[in-house]
């Protein structure tokens, strides 16, 4: 049943794109030249191209739980390098979101073995839990985005190849659909 639904939606997508532009897929196969490199959370509710209504080919996207930047993350580092050196993106967007499960897990002390390593990275991006007990989840997700901006600014690949590339930090509000800019203000 689910496979049929995916196939049906794909067929609708193909039909709509061909109606909109008969050469759409011919243009896609020529390659990509996205303006944006986006780091976003893996959360199924926050797809960057959907919430910004960007067509295919405009965003090169890397996703992970709680939109983390880590020098040790080879997948992110490779994506960043490729975006800067080969795709010549003009803007890097770090997009967090309200109601983030990764931030909630880090703040609440989740210690599941399979998540521990990653959640520890998220936890390090948040304020000290002992110093700030009265903070909202929205404030924590905003702080997480700002921490990732700082991590990107210190990332060796960004420092070497990111000169002149604009950086934006934003927070997607799942409760309203608003994309709030948090960096630079």
Image: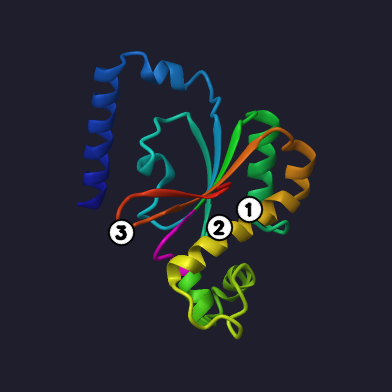
**Taking 4 as reference, is 73 left or right?**
right
> Residue 127, image x and y in percent?
60, 73
Above or below, 109 against 11 in this view is below
What whole-number distance in Å separates the C-alpha atoms at marks 1 and 2?
Answer: 6 Å
What whole-number distance in Å separates the C-alpha atoms at marks 3 and 1?
Answer: 24 Å
Circle 1 SS class: helix
Outermost residue on the bottom side: it is: 130
> Residue 123, image x and y in percent?
59, 73
Crowding at dot 1, Cα within 10 Å, few <14 / some 14-19 / many 20+, comes out as many
Residue 18 image-quadrant placement: top left
Q: Point out the stretch of residues depicted in magenta.
A: 96-102
**Taking 171 as reference, is 160 left or right?**
right
Q: Are marks 1 and 2 in contact (CB under 8 Å)?
A: yes
Q: Which residue is mark 2?
A: 145
Crowding at dot 2, Cα within 10 Å, few <14 / some 14-19 / many 20+, comes out as many
Q: Residue at x 44, y 50 (%)?
A: 180
Crowding at dot 3, Cα within 10 Å, few <14 / some 14-19 / many 20+, comes out as few
Q: Which residue is mark 1?
A: 149
Residue 24 image-quadrant placement: top left
**Labels 3 and 1: the sequence-earlier one:** 1
Q: Which residue is mark 3?
A: 175
**Labels 2 and 3: the sequence-earlier one:** 2
Above or below, 16 against 148 in this view is above
**Taking 14 as reference, is 63 left or right?**
right
> Residue 103, image x and y in percent?
50, 69
Above or below, 185 against 81 in this view is below
Outermost residue on the top side: it is: 23
């Amino acid at each position: 049943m689910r496979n049929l639904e995916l196939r049906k939606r794909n067929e609708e997508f193909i039909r709509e794109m061909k109606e909109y532009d008969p050469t759409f897929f011919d243009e896609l196969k020529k390659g990509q030249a996205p303006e944006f490199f986006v780091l976003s959370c893996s959360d199924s509710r926050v797809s960057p191209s959907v919430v910004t209504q960007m067509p295919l080919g405009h965003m090169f996207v890397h996703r992970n739980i709680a939109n983390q930047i880590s020098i040790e993350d080879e997948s992110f580092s490779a994506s960043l390098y490729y975006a800067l050196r080969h795709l010549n993106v003009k803007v890097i967007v770090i997009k967090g979101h309200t109601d983030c499960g990764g931030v909630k897990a880090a703040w609440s002390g989740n210690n599941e073995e399979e998540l521990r390593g990653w959640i520890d990275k998220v936890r390090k991006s948040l304020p000290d839990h002992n110093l700030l007990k009265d903070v909202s989840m929205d404030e924590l997700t905003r702080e997480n985005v700002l921490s990732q901006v700082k991590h990107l600014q210190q990332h060796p690949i960004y420092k070497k190849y990111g000169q002149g590339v604009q950086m934006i930090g934003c927070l997607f509000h799942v409760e309203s659909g608003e994309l709030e800019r948090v960096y630079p203000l």
